[in-house]
Image (tube, rainbow, N blue to C red):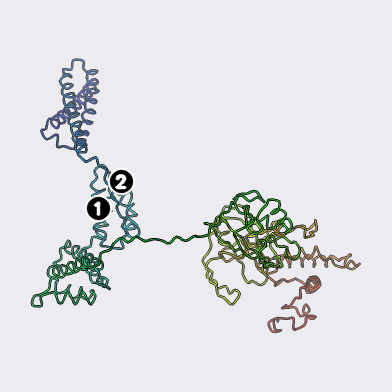
């Protein structure tokens, strides 16, 4: 067993010595300097690893055979001499690169900006890809992954979509260049594009020097591009000249026809030479432009200089001026006048300054030039001036350094629209509270797009035509289903489908309402305890959408009671059962405004009918559309209140 082991170790030692010898041959090659630095470094690393393995193998052989005759010093000397040669080659190569870079001028050149290529104009691909190759592709310090990253950075739209799905690895860069060349480096299409641009050159409207030179530049640009695409443009003279002559103005065309030799065929070079000479002649014959001194007559503009304190003295904030202060507007006229007088403010602009106020305007209430509208006593009573009822006009003096405010107050009644706070579950299951309003005249419910985004819901595509005031037809393309819960009664909830719109209405109420003007009973729980504060309306609910009339019936039971009598106080078990069935019919078997219910016995069905007529009648609800397969149940119902015919009932 030990002999086999020793044999294997000696074979391994021989192999490692051969590796060292091959590296030595590589290092002593006269063309070593022309080898790449990467290759030399790889050979050096291999030499080091081979010599290390050789030492370990030699130790294992000595353990098995102490009399081994291998001379380690010979291999060791060869190793160090080869290693020194390789290190010197690497050092010289790096010094050569450094010296080459030092020969470059140290002057800072402007950065070359590479334009982004979108793929819309095929003619721009060739300039783009050649500049990209000069700046990035030929840069040896960049890996292919880095080049691919820069390539994607300078592409957009269609061009980027061609290579966007390639993985960001080294091999993808060459594939990306190949795909772009295959797509945009199409010679026939480039030729067709340049010819099209040549045919579609804009006409020269006026034969001025500037327009003629622009026309020459456009022609030469397309002709040079076609020449680079190996097209025989020198043989296209009799095709191009008639086309280009149609682009000239009448004076330039007449001059060209008079100038050329009619006995010889015209050439493109002669045509362009004529245009250049004409442009020079027009430039030289134009009158010289002398620099005339212009004297601007100075105008003595009246400037109003006013010392303005940017902080509002009334509420002591710096976000607005006194004339736009909400608290100042809510104060009474006498309070505003007292504040202005105590602070020595101007009666017109309500600012502090010396001398007579330079602003002149009339009060919108009394039409006098004495004071600002906010300080006018001509208002009825001394009601606070509301912000929503004012029309503001701003006068600028010295770049908005002084501003005057004109206000007019018109009396208007504030109408409270029923609002309610509801709880809605978002996409993550969390509860959000939103304010909704009821509209008995609408046929569908709505929700704002901002609330849908806040809840994180995914609307479904549904096109709906909404007819609004003035018979205007509005199209809505999204809808969403909601599960709405009451904030007051936990057992009240219903599902509803709302159409998504940008805005439902303005902030309601339109102005702040003081609660001291209302007398709300303490035992009443309001569905919207902030009805008096202007806030955003995110939901418009149709009352008919609430399939369960729990809220209506609860209000009914709280406000109405049946008359107490021995008959009602001593109810039979059958009557109590019928009353329970009636409650169940209202709460669980009502769809919008239709009650669909049945009973096992006709007497019980009649009792339910009577309960419905009596109790709903007290609430002001008149029931109709009666239909039943029991004639006894509908004997006392007028035919006018029956919706279906007798044949259907049978």
Crowding at mark 2 (Cα within 10 Å: few <14, some 14-19, many 20+): some
Q: Secondary structure at mark 1?
A: helix
* 511 up-or-down from 18: above or below: below
Residue 415 located left or right of residue 355: right
- Estimate the spatial distance between the alpha carbons at disc 1 and disc 2, rounded to whole Å: 17 Å
Q: Quarter of the image containing the C terminus?
A: bottom right
Which residue is found at the position 24% from the left and 75% from the top?
249
Q: Picture coordinates of residue 18 (x, y %)?
A: 16, 29
Mark 1, residue position: 131
Q: List x then y, in percent, for residue 525.
A: 76, 57
Q: Badge 1: how crowded within 10 Å, few (<14), some, or many (20+)?
A: some
- Quick one: which residue is furthest to the top in this view? 67
Q: Quadrant of the N terminus?
A: top left
Q: Which image quarter: residue 119?
A: bottom left
Q: Earlier in the sequence, mark 1 or mark 2?
A: 1
Q: Which residue is mark 2?
A: 146
Q: What residue do we see at 49% from left, 60% from top?
A: 300
Total labels: the figure holds 2
Q: Nearer the viewer, residue 331 or 556?
A: 331
Residue 431 falls left or right of residue 585 = left
The answer to whether residue 252 is above or below residue 57 is below
Secondary structure beneath label 2: helix
Place of residue 640 in the rendered image (x, y in percent of width and height, measured from the top left): 74, 83
């Amino acid at each position: 067993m030990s002999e086999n082991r020793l044999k294997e170790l000696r074979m391994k030692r021989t192999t490692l010595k051969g590796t060292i010898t091959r590296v030595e041959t590589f290092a002593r090659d006269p063309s070593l300097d022309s080898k790449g630095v990467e290759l030399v470094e790889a050979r050096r690393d291999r030499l080091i690893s081979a010599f290390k393995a050789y030492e370990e193998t030699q130790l294992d052989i000595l353990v098995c055979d102490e009399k081994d005759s291998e001379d380690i010093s010979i291999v060791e000397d060869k190793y160090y001499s080869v290693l020194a040669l390789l290190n010197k080659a690497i050092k010289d190569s790096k010094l050569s690169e450094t010296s080459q870079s030092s020969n470059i001028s140290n002057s800072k050149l402007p950065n070359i900006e590479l334009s982004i290529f979108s793929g819309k104009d095929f003619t721009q691909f060739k300039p783009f890809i050649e500049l990209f190759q000069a700046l990035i592709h030929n840069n040896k310090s960049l890996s292919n992954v880095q080049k691919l990253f820069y390539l994607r950075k300078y592409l957009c739209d269609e061009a980027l979509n061609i290579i966007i799905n390639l993985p960001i690895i080294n091999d993808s860069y060459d594939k990306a260049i190949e795909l772009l060349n295959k797509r945009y480096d199409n010679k026939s299409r480039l030729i067709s594009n340049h010819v099209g641009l040549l045919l579609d050159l804009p006409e020269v409207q006026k034969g001025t020097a500037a327009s003629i030179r622009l026309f020459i530049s456009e022609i030469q640009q397309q002709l040079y591009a076609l020449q680079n695409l190996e097209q025989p443009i020198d043989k296209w003279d009799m095709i191009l000249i008639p086309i280009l002559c149609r682009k000239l103005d009448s004076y330039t065309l007449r001059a060209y026809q008079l100038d050329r030799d009619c006995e010889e065929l015209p050439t493109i070079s002669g045509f362009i030479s004529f245009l250049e000479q004409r442009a020079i002649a027009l430039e030289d014959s134009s009158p010289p432009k002398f620099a005339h001194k212009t004297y601007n007559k100075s105008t003595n503009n009246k400037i109003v200089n006013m010392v303005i304190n940017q902080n509002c003295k009334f509420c002591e904030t710096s976000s607005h001026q006194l004339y736009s202060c909400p608290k100042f507007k809510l104060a009474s006229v006498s309070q505003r006048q007292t504040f202005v007088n105590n602070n020595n403010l101007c009666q017109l602009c309500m600012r502090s300054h010396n001398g007579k106020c330079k602003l002149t305007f009339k009060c919108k209430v009394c039409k006098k030039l004495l004071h600002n509208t906010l300080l006018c006593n001509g208002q009825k009573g001394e009601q606070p001036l509301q912000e929503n009822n004012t029309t503001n006009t701003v006068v600028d003096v010295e770049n908005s350094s002084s501003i005057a405010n004109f206000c007019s107050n018109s009396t208007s009644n504030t109408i409270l629209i029923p609002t309610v706070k509801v709880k809605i579950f978002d996409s993550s299951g969390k509860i959000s509270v939103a304010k909704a309003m009821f509209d008995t005249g609408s046929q569908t419910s709505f929700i704002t797009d901002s609330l849908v985004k806040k809840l994180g819901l995914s609307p479904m595509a549904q096109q709906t035509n909404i007819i609004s005031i003035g018979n205007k037809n509005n199209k809505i393309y999204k809808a969403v289903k909601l599960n709405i819960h009451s904030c007051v009664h936990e057992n009240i909830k219903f599902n509803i489908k709302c159409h998504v719109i940008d805005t439902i209405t303005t902030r309601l109420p339109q102005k702040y309402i003081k609660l001291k003007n209302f007398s709300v009973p303490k035992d009443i729980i309001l569905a919207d305890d902030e009805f008096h504060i202007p806030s955003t309306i995110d939901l418009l609910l149709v009352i008919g959408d609430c399939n369960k009339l729990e809220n209506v019936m609860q209000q009914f039971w709280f406000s109405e009671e049946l008359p107490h009598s021995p008959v009602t106080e001593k109810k039979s078990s059958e009557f109590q059962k019928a009353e329970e069935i009636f409650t169940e019919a209202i709460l669980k078997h009502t769809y919008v405004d239709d009650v669909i219910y049945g009973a096992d016995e006709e007497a019980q069905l009649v009792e339910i009918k009577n309960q419905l007529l009596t109790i709903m009648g007290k609430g002001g609800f008149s029931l109709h559309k009666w239909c039943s397969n029991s004639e006894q149940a509908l004997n006392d119902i007028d035919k006018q209140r029956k919706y279906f015919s007798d044949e259907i009932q049978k």
